[in-house]
Image: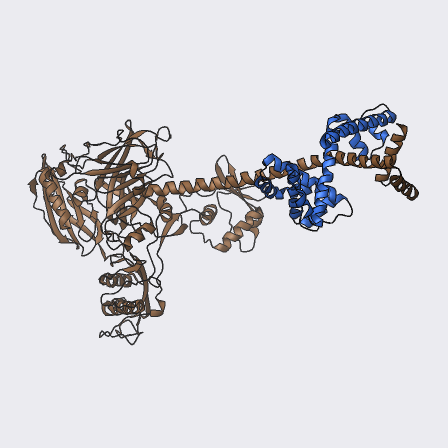
Chain colours: A brown, B blue
Amino acid sequence: METYNQHIELIHSYLNNLLSKEEQLNFENKLKTNVEFNTLYKEHIVFVNGLERIKIKEDIFKAKRAYTTQKWIKISGISIIVIGALVMLYTIVFNTSEIEPASNNDSLNTILLDSVSTKKAEHDTTVDYSEVKTDSTKTDSEVEISYTTTTTNKKFGSISETQVNIQKKPQNIKIDVTNDTIIKCKEGTILKIKKGTFINPNTQQIVTGKINLNVTEYYKLSDILLANLSTVSNGKQLETGGMLYIEAKQNGTALELKDGTPIEIQFPTTNKKPEMQLFSGQWSNDNINWTLQSDVIDGLIVQEETVEVPFAIVEQVPTFPGCEAEDNETRKKCTENAISKFISRNFNTETGISLGLSGKQRINCIFKIDQGGNVVFIQTRAAHPRLSEEADRVLNLLPQFNPGVQRGRTVIVPYSLPIVFTIEGESTNTNTRFSNLDSISTNPIAVSIDPLNIKPIIEMDTIYTERRGMVELIREVMHDKDFPVDSLFIMEWENYKKQRLIRELDVMNNKRFVLRKPLFEMQGTKFKILEDDSITRGGHVVRIPWDDKKIPTTTSIIRVVPKQTFSAGRVAVTANQFDELLEESNSDISSRDVSYYVLKTSNLGWINCDRFINGRTKRIKYKLKIKNADGASISMVFKSMNSVLPSWYTNGVYDFQTVGAGEPIVLVAIKRKNGKLYYDTIDTTTKVNPQLDFDFKEVSIGDLKQVLEKLNSSL
Amino acid sequence: MSDQDILVLFKNGQRDKAFKKLYRLYPRIEKLVLSKGGNKADANDVFQEALIILNRNLETSNFKLTSSFYTYLYSVSRFVWSDIQKNLSKQQLQQLNAQEVEVFQAVIEEKKYQLAEHAFLEIGKRCQQLLQLFYHKAMSFHDIANVMQFKSSKIAKNQKYKCLQKAKDIYKTKLKSVQS
């Protein structure tokens, strides 16, 4: 055993290079000669290597574990990304499927119901239908939508005491708000309601379960007149694309819309007009006033596809009648020339001369040629309002264009041009020089269009918001409502604040300003010590700023947003689908076909899809004196557009405030006396000091409705 | 990570990191074993064996890696698997080229070490530790006695002898059973 041990030790030393040269040689010799020693050596090597395996295996195991963990981290990371992407894809697909009614045919419930409304009674064959689509997977047996007709107790007219209900009856729709719902109302209005849209105003909780929705549609003139509705927003005349009254109730509690979840409303229209916006209505003194729902404008921009294309880039320019050439470039030139000539011929430069103006006059004009080829949204700016008015007048005379086309769809095309002309010499001298000699006008006073300056622009909406800023603050502190504040002074002020020369204190909610002594001792200082200042021992001034009522607001913020645009089509389709449909020759869809104004409301109650009437003719005051009025309600109906103006009755005078001059109108008067209805209409045009008298005829409610319905078709 | 980088890791003694990198090649080796009728556990064993052989060869000074790690591991794995299956005919053996013979010899050699390893696994944890400390950490008996809490270096020395002897006995019986 001793020798064995010695041998092992010797081998160990040899393997670890611990032996001297001599010993090594000895060892190797021994290996060759001593067979027993040799086997022992080999055996030992096997052992040592075997022992090493254990160690290596441990390392490999560790490495493998590290590798697999890394792999799993990678795999799980990738799968999380993939799942996230799938979820997003799913939501996108889910959302778009809501907009495409066709994709959900399984759950599309079509319910046919007889209308009970008295108005429809004459047309006994008419069947009103309403389509309601929900995303629920409920079986058809659980029909959750039912229509009933209820009567409202709202009285007609303003002064009448009689209890006659001729108000339009609302459609009562029961919906389940735990699902997204799309409702098509009797007259074509489509409401898209997302789940969780309604809140209970008392608890501020989102309402779930079934609710009652009362919707009244006012598209027909008769309906509008009978409801005593009008189209005025803060004194400005509107043109309506349809009005609605929406009421949501659950167990008798009126519900409200949750902030940020508007209802999308599609108003059907046969003649689409631009700039339609949603207005909310408020009744005051028996007349309704519409205010713009400004808070949803931003949402609209995201929602809707732009269909306005500038003149310079539109694929097929809108053409002046007679300019229908093959080549777009030719048509463009021809149209531009035609517009120039048209304006040269019609523009009356006497306007400028009579105003005593001289020199070069420039009127900047912008208008749009809508999808119907009409010239709309005329805006002009000139040195004098009378020139601007004249330009308005001339542009209004422009004939109907052939609308511009982009990618197979008719589009709105904005067009801008300056009208430039020169009035020479003294104001008494009527000679004017043409700035463009190739004008063919025979009129000695000619107008030319500066062709270089024609650059159509994309129309933007300017939204003004008043805000009190630095200017007001400085004036408050200076106790001077006319204190001149420029940007330089604001910079100085900020510097003083940084140097702690001006400090704002908030003592018990009372604002104080500390103005330190150096401010008053500077050269050319604008700071003065005032009577009611309190002065500290150090000579600093503590001043109470003026109330903000004493300083009028001068700052208004201007926000520029692109004009909203609308999606079109018989049904709500995506832009691509719409394009495809257009290419199908046998498709019954055209852009002038029934289309919708798609808008979103964030309020319930009275809702109006309207646009402001711009660029019309001169505005006049319109007052009617009627002897036999007896408190009748008189509305002014415009023949050229969907617009109804109310009147304010005081001392036998009906005041319509300002209206456009020379507009063809129908005055509709409805009077109620001793429980009887009287009615008359007058066809006329608007002018100053009209002399009119009504010949009131007694009518029954049914007759009145019939008469008013005739108005629908005549207008 | 190139082969060169992995070689550097081996040289710097960062064996586990190198193994971790080499494990990227495992899926391909696994495919090989699976295609030859093995299962996943087999593939795991084969790959481990290949890594051990690679490591051992890298430690001998006269070894030079002439191909990529993948090629080397692939050929080693192939032999290891064939050897386990015992389906290498004499004819096939004669057709091997020099490089392949080298690999094959390494595989055969490793089998002996494997036996020794099994023997060590049977002698108990404490004996294993003692022998590891002595042969691989090259610790003196004095230090070993300290670490393993023997009363003296002499006892440690004695213990080492007994453990080695025990392992050798097991190894010899195993060898006999394999050969017979």
* Residue A559 place in picture, x, y as percent: 40, 51
Q: Nearer the viewer, residue B93 or A319?
A: B93
**Quadrant of the image occupied by residue A341:** bottom left
Instruction: Decide if residue A221 is on the left or right side of residue A603.
Output: left
> Residue B115 at what x, y percent from top left?
73, 33
Farthest residue to the front: give it. Answer: B91
Going by the picture, which residue comes out furthest to the bottom?
Answer: A437
Count the labels in the image: 0
Q: Is residue A119 left or right of residue A248?
A: left
A510 lies above or below B66: above
Expressed as whole percent of the image width and height from the top left, the position of residue A436 reads 31, 74
Q: Nearer the viewer, residue A583 or A555?
A: A583
Q: Position of residue A154 (x, y in %)?
A: 19, 34
* Residue A667 makes an appearance in the image: no
Residue farthest right in this picture = A22
**Residue B112 visible in rendering:** yes
Above or below — where is B96 with respect to A61? below
Residue at 75% x, 30% y: name it.
B176
Query: Is A590 positioned to the left or the right of B70 in the image?
Result: left
> Which of the 4 quarters of the picture holds residue A392?
bottom left
Q: Quick check: A94 above or below A239?
A: above
